[in-house]
Image: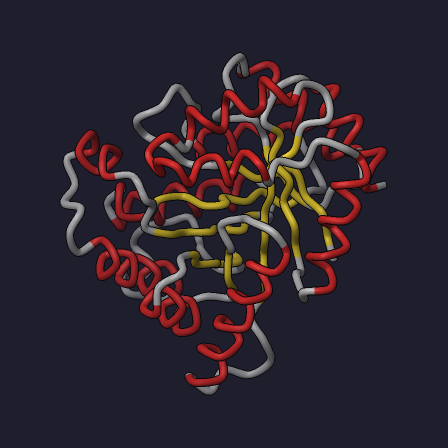
Amino acid sequence: MNVGVGLPTTTPGATGELLLEWARRADDGPFSCVAVLDRLVYDSFEPFAVLSAAAAATTRVRLATMIAIGPLRSTALLAKQAASVHGLSGGRLTLGLAVGARVEDYEAAGVEHRGRGRKLGEQLAYIRGAVDGNRVGPTRTGIELLAGGLSGPAFSRMARYTDGYAHNGGPPRAFAGAAARADAAWRDLGREGRPRLWGQGYFTLCDPERGEAYLRDYYAFTGGFVERIVAEQLTSVRAIKDFVRGYAGAGCDELVLFSTTPGVEELDRLAEAVG
């Protein structure tokens, strides 16, 4: 299993300079990818802009959205953004897409929340195929495409249009259950082989209290469930090693670990833990 690292695009205190330093250090370290989250109504960086900058600061790691909220964008613009990052990086983009869970993001974007699943399906078909007659360039050939979500339609979209599944986090047993559903949807459509399986988790090895405060703010919309998310934050080397081992045992191909605090010392200590 590969282990990648999330860039702290949504954590308080992150700057553009700091994000590029994370990307450069990740490229020099044991990590397979750098990944970004996506929020509109939050003090955060736009994911495709960050990945474009990271493309110039790195040469080796893959660049991933884990995930981008596809329906917030027009289909052609989304395809253009993804193809541009893919081209700037020399073909290193993994594009994970899902519908997102926050109504306020849709309200701010002026996009209808209802029908977002149908729109995402149309976007995946557009990006995967030559729906536009290749009028929207650069080329999208070679983009690794993932879809996330936990509903039946989400797994069906993943199996029909993409290369694999992007899970939204949690303990290894939660990932294992979702992975089994992804495999089943893949087989139901007669796809050969198996879907690529990506997972994610949150960690801090430097400042657990600051990390807890960030998670409570970022996931406040979940109500009481946020305390479960906080409790699952990895705060020791042993916890990270156990988490990585659990995901590997559950069949994960690529595990992305997101720091809940922005300091680069988090990246250095994570590299020691997983290296």
Residue at 67%, 25% in the rendered image: 22
In the shown orientation, is residue 65 left or right of residue 193? left
In the shown orientation, is residue 41 left or right of residue 254? left
Decide: is 59 above or below 208: below
The location of residue 123, given as percent across then percent down, is 30, 57
The location of residue 203, given as percent across then percent down, is 65, 33
Q: Nearer the viewer, residue 73 or 185?
A: 185
Residue at 67%, 20% in the rendered image: 21
Decide: is 264 above or below 198: above
Decide: is 163 above or below 1: below
Tell me the quarter of the image containing the C terminus: top right
Residue at 81%, 40% in the rendered image: 238
Tell me the quarter of the image containing the N terminus: bottom right
Q: Nearer the viewer, residue 86 or 49?
A: 49
The location of residue 107, given as percent across then percent down, is 17, 34
The location of residue 181, given as percent across then percent down, is 48, 72
Residue at 83%, 37% in the rendered image: 273
Decide: is 60 above or below 198: above
In the shown orientation, is residue 60 left or right of residue 19? right
Q: Quadrant of residue 105?
A: top left
